[in-house]
Amino acid sequence: MDDTAGLDVPPRLLMGPGPITVDPRVLRAMSAQLVGQFDPFMTEAMTGTMALYREVFRTANEQTFLVDGTSRAGIEAALVSLLEPGDRVLVPVFGRFGALLREIAERCGAEVHTVEVPWGQVVPPEVVEEAVLRVRPKLLAVVQGDTSTTMCQPLADLGEICRRHGVLLYCDATASLGGNPFEADAWGIDVATAGLQKCLGGPPGSAPITLSPRAVELIEARTHVEAGIRDDGDTDRGTRIASNYLDLAQVMAYWGPRRLNHHTEASSMLYAARECARLLVEEGLDAAIARHELHGRAMVAGVRGLGLEVFGDPAHRMSNVVAVHVPDGVVADTVRAALLDDFGIEIGTSFGPLHGRVWRIGTMGYNARRDAVLTTLAALEQVLRGCGAAVPAGGGVGAAREVYAA
Ligand SMILES: *Cc1c(COP(=O)(O)O)cnc(C)c1O
């Protein structure tokens, strides 16, 4: 690649666990010109984006806004703002992102306890409740859809358990929001964070977040934001939030009516996040979830039609990504390379105990589409045959088309 030449991005169909091909409407929104940070147009766009994300998270939480950064920035902002050194946290771990929650909570100085299940399962609510009674945590931190295993943790029961025992509930809904049911208020979730590059159809770089009034109260009690730049280190009680950039008390004061100066809002990412939410709200959240369910089901039927097996508890699979066992005698990365080189299609590799054993194929956001599903299955069939696997001719596309015809 000539470093001084303009970027000539190859056409790709991103069918992995994220990022996915960005919706062209979002790309157009991102190319709009900037206005000043406190221009009335900008502050109105920020306020409107808050309202749109209340719909996406299904919440009445006033404090619903964007953290600038990828999904991980949202996770870290939530945990560093909620947790003080010595606080007890319980993390149900059923994949790689549960382990990430544990790690971030540890870095906040919290005393972290986990309940773990083998990859491919979710954590039963009675196991969580038993641990809550034993650990008496301040916070339960859990992932909804863990793309490393494709499992979707049921949350309604966990919300009830947390209410019953006075525990705060944080959820990383990055991979699942917009493609699987998510109900912040009805399920009693205090804080949820997400990202754009999964079912929301945008690029990575903005982390929508919502906080319940009791979470806001807890965070604000840790700090007093009296000026745009707080430099005195003075706190009335508890310890100061260890990050400036991710101090949600300051970020809330910036998004709130006082507009206290903090960071410069990442305007182009705001435009992107706003368009992602607009796409979802226009389509209707239920319709978007149903679309992910349909195309996810067609993909599963297709890979089974090719004689491949699907990984994980079928009762708890996310609708927008499927883990597919690599057949004997086939090298996982050879197939991925051939899909990319010959067809311009990307599917996902896997981590940890699943490395080399499964591919992860996503049908999410802009790519939760019939043509994307059928093209991927047709290409996969050819590549598998090229690797010497015995695959039924047309078995994948045929099975998926039957799902669409039903
Ligand atoms: C993909 C994913 C993320 C991504 O985090 P980034 O910082 O945007 O890379 C976070 N959490 C979960 C559960 C995910 O699946």
Image (tube, rainbow, N blue to C red):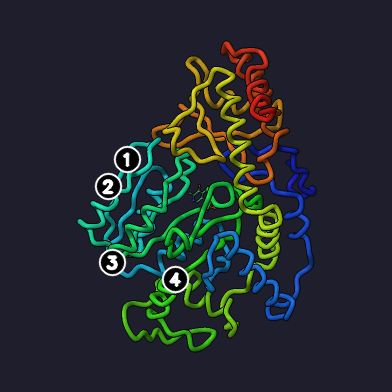
Classify mark 3: residues with Cα within 10 Å, few (<14), some (14-19) or many (20+). Answer: some
Provide the residue designation for mark 3: 87
> Which dot, 4 or 1, sits closer to the camera?
1
Name the amino acid type tagged 2. Val
Going from N to C along the chain, the mark reached first, 1 or 2, is 1
Tell me: 66 left or right of 136: right
Going from N to C along the chain, the mark reached first, 4 or 1, is 1
Image disc number at residue 32: none
Quarter of the view holding residue 378: top right
Question: Residue visible at 67% across and 23% down?
Answer: 397
Classify mark 1: residues with Cα within 10 Å, few (<14), some (14-19) or many (20+). Answer: some
Outermost residue on the front side: it is: 406
Q: Are marks 2 and 4 in contact (CB under 8 Å)?
A: no
Q: Nearer the viewer, residue 260 or 4?
A: 260
Q: Do the residues labelled 3 and 2 touch (CB within 8 Å)?
A: no
In the image, residue 53 above or below residue 391: below
Q: Is mark 4 on a helix, strand or loop?
A: loop
Question: Residue visible at 56% across and 62% down?
Answer: 208
Going from N to C along the chain, the mark reached first, 4 or 3, is 3
In the image, residue 353 above or below residue 135: above
